[in-house]
Image (cartoon, grey):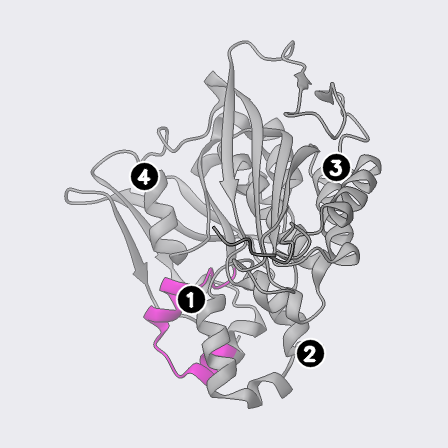
Amino acid sequence: MDSVNYEAVNYEASGVSVAAANDVKQQFKGMVSARGLAHCTPVNQVGAFASLVEIDLKGYTNPVFVLKSEEPGSKQLLSLDNHRVEWIARDLINHLVNDIAVMGAVPCAVLDTIICGKFEKETILKLVGEISQACIENGCVLVGGETSEQPGVLPAGRYVLQASVLGVADRQKIVDGSRIKQGDALIALASNGLHTNGYSLVRKLMEARPAILEERVDGESFMDSLLKPHLSYAGTVKRLLERHSGDVHGMAHITGGGIHDNLIRILQSDGLRAEIDLSMIRIPGIFKVIKKYANITDEEMLATFNMGAGIIAAVEEARAGEILGTLGAGAYRIGQITQSGGSREVTFNQTLSWDR
């Protein structure tokens, strides 16, 4: 058999730099597991095969662990292309934490995943640093995760982000909508814009009508208004439940699918209807610009975006005034729970007030 002298093919030639990855991961040690919290303390450091976390459960009568994974969708493409690396990191954590906060849970530990086409040291360190800081601000800690260079799967400069959270709640204090009843008031916590949903539509709109990029929205550039980070409601919800625990019967985080598809998820009993008064919704300016350029119906806007309601809570009507006082200026009435003729329903009354 004739011998053939093949050129060496190694990992570096395939586009993966192990040395670069190791250098970046060494610098994670100052970001990941660097600080513990009163209720959540990392036991080991970066580099182990898994993360160990000690959780203080002394304050819980019947603790239940709450788990959630999330990714920021196509917003991450726009954010990274427009140099909003820190913003998309906050989107990832704030969305994630909101999802468990509305169930009455306290976040403890977060694991992140960063997949990229090429290790870009500055970008990855910004992402991990900001993810870690956002965790601390939300009362949890980044304890580890996975950073993976995958040339051929993703081109250089492209990233896929994901994170998972472990939280804890007292079983008897879980907020799952099972206590929602006829007569409850519906209160909205204002959003600051799109949060992390509807970006596929907006990307298509920007491609079809690039003049939208020249718009100003409430004194900001269109891109700044479009990409501002998803609000975190974790502190607000914690304060609400500490002061009015028994009066909060259900909470919905308004994400993909808009008000209808998320609010119906917390209606546990047939015969209940959530009636939303559209005229009461405080519509952020960014949605008005999108509506103008997209020329789509109010129904499609409502099905795609949160329209200004980041969270909707069903609360005891007799305590609604006090609850609004606790929540502050960003909260407002948006409707009520009534009796339906049969199955669970979310209905819209009146019309959106675009000129307000």
Q: Which residue is mark 4?
A: 267
Q: Which residue is mark 3?
A: 136
**286 relative position to 47: left or right:** left
Whether residue 184 is visible here, answered yes or no, is: yes
Q: Nearer the viewer, mark 1 or mark 3?
A: 3
Label 1 element class: helix
**Quadrant of res 291:** bottom left
Instruction: Measure the C-alpha gap from mark 4 to mark 1.
Output: 22 Å
Instruction: Measure the C-alpha gap from mark 1 to mark 2.
Output: 27 Å
Q: Residues within 10 Å of mark 1 (few under 14, many from 20)?
A: some
**349 relative position to 53: left or right:** left
As drawn, the residue found furthest toward the front would be 1
Residue 191 in percent (x, y) is at 57, 57
Query: From the viewer's perspective, is residue 277 above or below residue 102?
Result: below
Find the magenta span and give its range: 290-308
Residue 300 located within the stretch drawn in magenta? yes
10 or 148: nearer the eye? 10
Residue 330 in percent (x, y) is at 62, 54
277 or 56: nearer the eye? 56
**Quadrant of res 139:** top right
Q: Which residue is mark 1?
A: 279
**Quadrant of res 296:** bottom left
Label 4 element class: loop
Instruction: Measure the C-alpha gap from mark 3 to mark 2.
Output: 29 Å
Q: Which residue is mark 2?
A: 221
